[in-house]
Amino acid sequence: MLRGSGETIEGPRPSDWFDVFVDDRGDLVALLMDVRSSAESTDDFLATSLRDTRTALRRCDALHTVVGELEMQLATHPGVEAGLIILRLSQRDARVEILNAGMPAIANARPGGRLDLYPALSGPIGRRVGEVHPYELVPLVWGGTWLAVSDGMMNGSLDTENVAALCAKLDLAGQGLALASASSDELYDAFQRLLSAARFLRDDASGVVIAADSSARFQSGIM
């Protein structure tokens, strides 16, 4: 059974959107977007971008198709770009699809304490016309936990070492299942404790945690 939770700590400039849902094929999908703009974009446009991206993922579109549709939307608003993370976890196929475009490294704490990091393989969607946004395909390891965060959680940094340090502070290897099963308020508190009160929160800080619960591997359902 896969368990997932996410939360956003709001900053002075709202920019983050996330969702965790089950697609039409029964796979668990985590979507995290960080929209950046040189000029203020309307809330309606940003909400539409998220909704359409989520709809494409829910109907199980290929990741390159999802990215292509988002690029077309952003092209109508010059100066707007979107950092994007997609995790699509399939219990049936025992695999994870990973797309990271312009966001901090995605972390996977595996059983035994090993931490795998998946940094961005491309820039944000919409920054450069025609840029290829590749994705990775890895086995789904039961007992592991995935963590995806926006750059607001890292104070604007994309340094993989900072993501590793965040995982250590969260004790992702030991507490991953608890975090993924936590309520919104509990996860908010866990993230808030990691953010220095003195730091300048440049925008929203978002995080999503997904755990592959090995004790419930053969149960039906995704929580």
Image: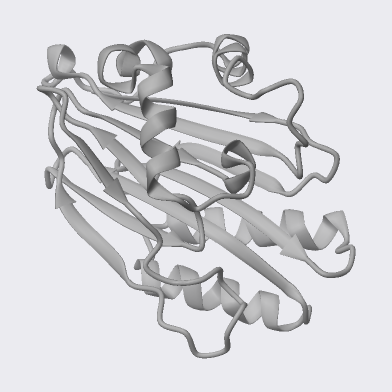
Residue at horizontal 50%, vertical 55%? 103
Q: On screen, 183 above or below 201? A: above
For the question of whether residue 23 can be seen, the reply is yes
Name the side, left or right, on which 86 lies relative to 204: left
Name the image quarter holding the N terminus. Answer: top left
Measuring from the top left, give residue 89's x and y in whole percent: 27, 43
Q: Considering depth in this image, is 120 or 54 the residue closer to the camera? A: 120
Residue at horizontal 36%, vertical 30%? 210
Measuring from the top left, give residue 113's x and y in whole percent: 16, 24
Measuring from the top left, give residue 63's x and y in whole percent: 37, 66
Residue 196 lies in quadrant: top right
Name the image quarter holding the C terminus. Answer: top left
Name the side, left or right, on which 132 lies relative to 219: right
Residue 135 lies in quadrant: bottom left
- Colouring style: one colour
Residue at horizontal 39%, vertical 48%? 160
Tell which residue pokes out farthest to the bottom in this image. Answer: 130
Name the side, left or right, on which 142 lies relative to 194: left
Q: On screen, 169 above or below 56? A: above
Residue at horizontal 49%, vertical 61%? 56
Instruction: Report the number of numbered marks.
Output: 0
Measuring from the top left, give residue 116's x and y in whole percent: 22, 42
For the question of whether residue 22 can be seen, the reply is no
Residue 183 lies in quadrant: top right
